[in-house]
Amino acid sequence: MKDIYSFVAKKDNTVVDCDSYLLENQEEAGYMANTILCNYLEVNEEGVNKIEIFKYDNVNFMFIGTIENVTE
């Protein structure tokens, strides 16, 4: 069964965008977060520096993790 995963695109601590997808598991959610971050970086390298991943469990959103662009 697929679950709802939400992705919040942020620049530092400011929310830039968010979207949700039906995905099979957390591994697939990690790949999706990486793809979303790469897409933002292709368009505007300074626009987004991290994607936060949340899983919806029919009542609450649970924080799963963060994918960050490290430029050092």
Image (cartoon, grey):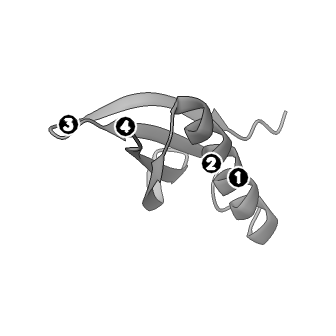
Label 2–label 1 contact, CB within 8 A: yes
The amino acid marked with disc number 4 is: Lys
Residue 65 vs residue 5: left or right?
Answer: right
Mark 3–mark 4 Cα distance, whole angstroms, equals: 8 Å
Local SS, label 1: helix
Which residue occupies 39% across, 40% down? Answer: 1
**Residue 27 percent across, percent down from the top left:** 61, 31
Local SS, label 3: loop
The earlier-in-sequence mark between 1 and 3 is: 1
Mark 4–mark 1 Cα distance, whole angstroms, equals: 17 Å
Which residue occupies 70% across, 52% down? Answer: 35
Q: Which residue is mark 4?
A: 55
The earlier-in-sequence mark between 2 and 3 is: 2
Which residue occupies 65% across, 62% down? Answer: 47
The earlier-in-sequence mark between 4 and 1 is: 1
Mark 2–mark 3 Cα distance, whole angstroms, equals: 21 Å
The amino acid marked with disc number 1 is: Thr
Q: Which residue is mark 3?
A: 60
The amino acid marked with disc number 3 is: Asn
Q: Which residue is mark 2?
A: 32
Mark 4–mark 2 Cα distance, whole angstroms, equals: 13 Å
The amino acid marked with disc number 2 is: Met
Local SS, label 2: helix
